[in-house]
Amino acid sequence: MYERMLNKSEVPTVENMTAYCGGTAALFTELNEWLSAEYGTAQTIVFPYGNSYGWGISHKRKRKLVCNVFPENGAFAVMLRMSDTQFASVYGQLGDYAKNYIDNKYPCNDGGWIHYRVTDKEQLADAQTMLAVKCGSAKEKQ
């Protein structure tokens, strides 16, 4: 379960990625559309970071990475980096599931990376809370 799209020789479409998410397909679509509509992110289908990550959708604002969204069999994962200050600013608003990801983040400089798996609406809401902080309160559209 939760296998990623690892066949590097076949570039998937957004529709392929959405279908791959199975029962979370609507949430996958909702997150990607929300990031583009709310924060003006540019979406690109990518195969970043090596074979274990697989295909995903990169969201960037003004050439700066916001996050990558990786479809998984029955779920999807949001990979993002935030500072410790950003994580701390939302920590109290998140459920225990999201807090566990933050508590176990991969450290990097003054913050860290999380690979946040989304399987339900509550987890999507927590992902959006974190991404809203990542993107800042200013809703600058490209």
Image (cartoon, grey):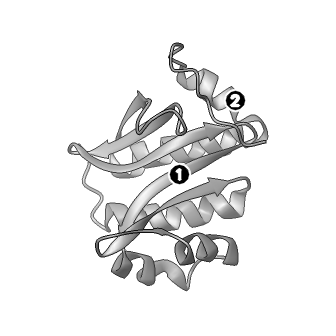
Location of the C terminus (image quadrant): top left
Q: In this view, does 42 lie above or below 124?
A: above
SS class of the residue under badge 2? Answer: helix
Q: Residue 36 carries which label?
A: none
Q: Alpha carbon of mark 2 to alpha carbon of mark 1: how far?
A: 15 Å
In this view of the protein, can residue 130 be seen by the observer?
yes
Question: Toward the viewer: 37 or 26?
Answer: 26
Query: Residue at the spot x=55%, y=40% of the render?
Result: 70
Q: Write down the quadrant of residue 71 in the picture.
A: top right
SS class of the residue under badge 1? Answer: strand
Contact flag, marks 2 and 1 (Cβ < 8 Å): no
Query: Residue at the spot x=56%, y=73% of the render?
Result: 104
Position of residue 142 in the picture relative to residue 19 (left or right):
left
Q: Write down the quadrant of residue 12 in the picture.
A: top right
Q: Earlier in the sequence, mark 2 or mark 1?
A: 2
x and y, in percent, of residue 40 in the image = 33, 45
Q: Write down the quadrant of residue 100 in the picture.
A: bottom right
Q: What residue type is labelled 1?
A: Val
- Residue that label 1 marks: 78
- Residue that label 2 marks: 20
Q: In this view, does 18 lie above or below 116?
A: above
Question: Toward the viewer: 91 or 129?
Answer: 91
x and y, in percent, of residue 120 in the image = 74, 55
Q: What residue type is labelled 2?
A: Tyr
Location of the N terminus (image quadrant): top right
Position of residue 140 in the picture relative to residue 83 (left or right):
left
Q: Residues within 10 Å of mark 1 (few under 14, many from 20)?
A: many
In this view of the protein, can residue 133 be seen by the observer?
no
Query: Residue at the spot x=55%, y=61% of the render?
Result: 127
